[in-house]
Image: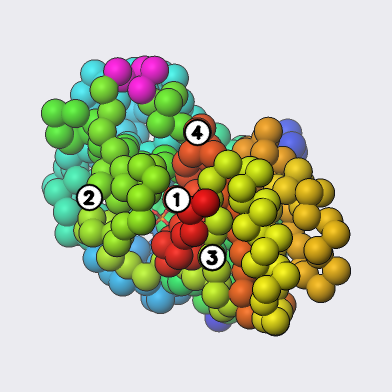
Amino acid sequence: MKTVILEIDPRTPNLTEHPGIKEAGAILRAGGLVAFPTETVYGLGANGLDAEAVKGIYRAKGRPSDNPLILHIVEAAALEELVLQVPEQARLLMERFWPGPLTLIFRKRPHVPDEATGGLNTVAVRMPSHPVARAIIAAAQVPVAAPSANSSGRPSPTVAAHVIRDMDGRVEMIVDGGPCEVGVESTVLDLTGEVPVLLRPGGVSFEELQAVLGEVQLDVGVADSRLDQNFAPKSPGMKYRHYSPEAELMIVEGEPAQVREKLAALIQETDKRLGLLATREMVEGLNQYLAQVSVKVLGSRADLEEAAAQLFKLLREFDEEEVDLIIAEGLPLQGIGLAVMNRLRKAAGYQIMRV
Ligand code: TXA
Ligand code: MG
């Protein structure tokens, strides 16, 4: 398949009138696949109410078809058509965080196809804020099912070049709207039980959810990785193979001074080709040891948003290099740090050294 690659500046006025956006909408309505930017990561979209179109997503990604997808909408009215009931908690969250990086799980209406929900009786819905995503979904006039636009097992794409690398020739269109602002995927919150459960930390933090809802439970996978313990993932959503880099990846977690000592020792001990993924402050503190090391700066310790925005891109860069071992600095678990560390720990296969 010949993939059309289209650049669209998100600041373009009247995006809904843009011919490229109209074409993207028409492709989606006709059952085709369009990759597009969102504020979190690039998504690989299909008509979420068309079972055949949704199957195309799994084919293009090489993803197991029982892993459920998120339906993307642009108006709250579209939600009522997908779900049986909108709980009061959801209304509070929508008011505060939509449009934005928060995905909510509801009980689904029967016409939402099993292909989109992995056969579950629940459905994940999100209203993105990215202008290009919104214009495309509006043009499609259907809820758009969209997982991250990477091939299964690769890091989520945060720039169009990553999408092109993974999806060129597999989808009808890739829309390049520049880099994604948040850089990690949306927060996924299950609202179908008595107490809301955080299934995946993301762009909206656990603390922000607690401030609105009071009690929020952490799904076992998230909870265990929040408590400073080693653990083997056991919740069903975590059974899929997650991205892990070609090189071995190990995280050193603890107070910065001790982490620095440990990283310095590791760098001096090893004869492997090393990569270092660390904050600017840590890299400065290690400067004297770094001559032979491939260094990637994960933002500043004081600005974890920057770390989130860089993480997947830097992991992809390490994959392009021939390092044998990547050592990473563990970051604080507050705010978006929880999402960053959740992804990093998965990528490391939970190889964590605590100091
Ligand atoms: O930021 C994002 O959420 C991006 C952009 C493109 O919107 N999308 C994304 O989709 O990350 P995906 O498919 O890579 O991740 C969806 C997550 C998975 O962890 C999936 O298991 C969970 O949402 N999920 C979807 N539907 C669910 C459901 N009904 N019950 C529980 N978890 C669900
Ligand atoms: Mg994904």
Q: Which residue is mark 1?
A: 342
Q: Are marks 4 and 3 in contact (CB under 8 Å)?
A: no
Q: Which residue is mark 3?
A: 250
Question: What is the magenta segment's predominant secondary structure?
Answer: helix
Task: Check disc 2 and report the residue beneath it.
Answer: 112
Label 2 vs label 4: CA separation?
36 Å
Cα–Cα gap, marks 2 and 3:
41 Å
Q: How many marks?
A: 4
- What's under tag 4, amino acid-wise? Gln
What is the spatial separation of the Cα atoms under label 1 and label 3, in whole angstroms?
14 Å
- Give amino acid for label 3: Met
Indicate the amino acid at tag 1: Asn
Q: Quadrant of the N terminus?
A: bottom right
Image spot of residue 259 (x, y percent): 61, 50
Judging by the rendered image, the residue that carries numbered circle 4 is 334
**Residue range (magenta):** 210-214
Circle 3 — which element?
strand
Dot label at residue 60: none
- Residue 354 visible within the image: yes
